Image (tube, helix red, strand yellow):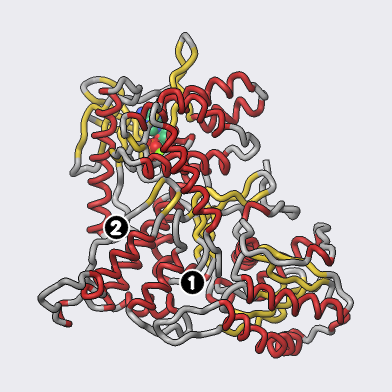
Amino acid sequence: MVITLGFEGSANKIGVGIIRDGKVLANVRKTYVTPPGFGFLPKETAEHHREKILGILKEALEVSKVEIKDIDVICYTKGPGMAPPLLTVAIAARTIAQVWNKPILGVNHCIGHIEMGRLITKAKNPTVLYVSGGNTQVIAYSNRKYRIFGETIDIAVGNCLDRFARIIKISNDPSPGYNIEQLAKKGTKYYPLPYSVKGMDISFSGILSEIEKKALPHKANKNRKKKVEDEELPSHEDLCFSLQETIFAMLVEITERAMAHCGSHEVLIVGGVGCNERLQEMMGIMCKERNAKLFATDERFCIDNGIMIAHAGWEMFTTGTRMKWDEATITQRYRTDDVEVTWDVASDE
Amino acid sequence: MSEIAIIKQGAEAKLYKGVWNGNECLVKERFVKNYRLPELDKTLTKSRIKAEQKTIKRCEDQGIKVPKLFHVDFNERKVYMEYFLKAITAKEYIFRLEKSSDNNALDLLCSKIGSIVGKFHVNNIIHGDLTTSNMLINFNDDGYDVIFIDFGLSSYSAGHEDKGVDLYVLERSLISTHSSLPELFEKMLISYKETNTLSTETIKRFEEVRARGRKRTMVG
Ligand SMILES: Nc1ncnc2c1ncn2[C@@H]1O[C@H](COP(=O)(O)OP(=O)(O)O)[C@@H](O)[C@H]1O
Ligand SMILES: [Mg+2]
């Protein structure tokens, strides 16, 4: 029996999770929500995490009913992410581990998402679509690593959505992506947008600038004589609808391309954007059309959380990975394929 | 024309064995993708069939070996083309060579692939999906030809950025698919530089595309 505790805080969520051999004992999380039109900045986000982290830890311990002496290892997100919040959480994790006299383990955030998705859905050896605010990757496992088959060549899909939410100033509560999804449900008219896939790679920056022009034509063309009347402008609902339909079609397409290339029959969607129901629906239809199976999770596990760090840490710890104190640092850029996989991932030929 | 059994389902299309003018051929059907909006599906399918048609013609004009195109049916979303019945994909061929640790054969393959990609680029042909699933190894008495296929994402551009991205896509797919052979891409670049006389600028742009990826922040 191995119990691990995980801290996550690489972006605007701060979470603590406790897990015992695949059984979730606690999963507590708080989000730093900024006003409409504003993104989260490193310093303020770190301050938010600093303020909340001990309260969340206390709550997680209470919910889990675990005694401190039974915890085997303290895990935290080593990267990738924003430096100040990463650092805040790493310092807290190190301090707690010292005080409680426990070993410490830094975990790759992306690996956390994948391993959590596999645990919850029981997907065996899936093609993984990892979609979040900072990452857009199509991943498959081979030869002791999660290999990146496709990736964004500019901005991440979640970043594209978040920035569009700021352009049209919609609420960031609970998340910009969630509110775009709700508006998109009411959209009916499709405005064509650039569609940009490059093999298994993908690009979003052209779409973002095009949709900005559609949403704010005055800003895009300052010399314009005739003012565009408000009723001539595309509605936010239709723009959100058009944006989602375009970028999700692109994501499904590159996932399918990777599946064909790798001969895979399973898809797992992870990361914050992965809880979008329209994306899940589209991916499901694609899977059906090629006799494949879709695996996805809901917001508890899709959106950044402490339990995914605790669980990936569990996989590492139980297969012998240990970290020296002077290695317990952070790194802003830490790629999915930097991590040597020491645990079993389905059929490894 | 008639179609017999479905052979395989690729990244976007279903492939059948068929007959065209009494000859065996391959039918590639870009079937309706119900996951995307019908209007988007229609535009994409049409543009991809067109791209495939145009680029195959361009390659033929430049003496680059590609499947012959017999017939295009936009309504049925089908392309009828030459079927390389005995060919295997470069992906399978590399797996085979990897098992037998045949380094000379790997060098030869890389040289052939690099030289064709160079020919594409010097002629402003962007393949758009350079993976080892989209290269066929067609054995003959003197060895084999490498035949590139799947031009649905191809385009025509003199831009070094487009060519650089094309190389980036190739590199990424080699690293991920053939992870225990990290030297494949560098080997391909040797012959690439020989056939693409304008490669210096393209490679510079390729390195920029790669660097952009490495510098990108990965928050969330
Ligand atoms: N002309 C051909 N002769 C033999 N095999 C082919 C030919 N064209 C395609 N194939 C096989 O079918 C697969 C899918 O075809 P492709 O044109 O790449 O379609 P997709 O866009 O669906 O990937 C290829 O990877 C290859 O194995
Ligand atoms: Mg193909």
Q: Residue A313 carries which label?
A: none
Task: Tell me the crowding category of disc 2: few under 14, some 14 to 19, or many 20 or more residues within 10 angstroms, Cα based.
Answer: some
| A8 vs B41: above or below | below
Residue type at mark 2? Pro
Q: Could you say where residue B8 lies in the image, as x and y percent from the top left?
A: 42, 38
Classify residue A243 by image quadrant. bottom left
C-beta proximity under 8 Å, tags 2 and 1:
no
Classify residue B162 by image quadrant. top left
Quadrant for ligand 2 reads top left
Q: Specify whether B29 is left or right of B109.
A: left
Who is closer to the viewer here, B58 or B205? B205
Q: Specify whether A139 is left or right of A143.
A: left
**Circle 2 or circle 1, nearest the eye:** 2
Q: Could you say where residue A311 lies in the image, as x and y percent from the top left?
A: 71, 68
Q: Specify whether A13 is left or right of A175.
A: right
Regarding residue A274, the answer to whether it shows in the image is yes
Q: What element carries label 2?
A: loop
In the rendered structure, the residue with mark 1 lies on which chain? A
Q: Which mark is residue A275?
A: 1
Q: Which of marks 2 and 1 is nearer the N terminus?
A: 2
Who is closer to the viewer here, A334 or A107? A334
In the rendered structure, the residue with mark 2 lies on which chain? A
| A247 vs B23: above or below | below
Q: Residue at x 37, y 45 (%)?
A: B12
> Label 2, label 1: how many angstroms apart (C-alpha)?
24 Å
Q: Could you say where residue B20 lies in the image, as x and y percent from the top left?
A: 24, 25
Residue type at mark 1? Cys
Quadrant showing the C terminus of chain B: bottom right
Quadrant showing the N terminus of chain B: top left
Who is closer to the viewer here, A81 or A8? A81
Q: Could you say where residue B3 lies in the image, as x and y percent from the top left?
A: 29, 33
Would you name the residue on which mark 2 appears?
A194
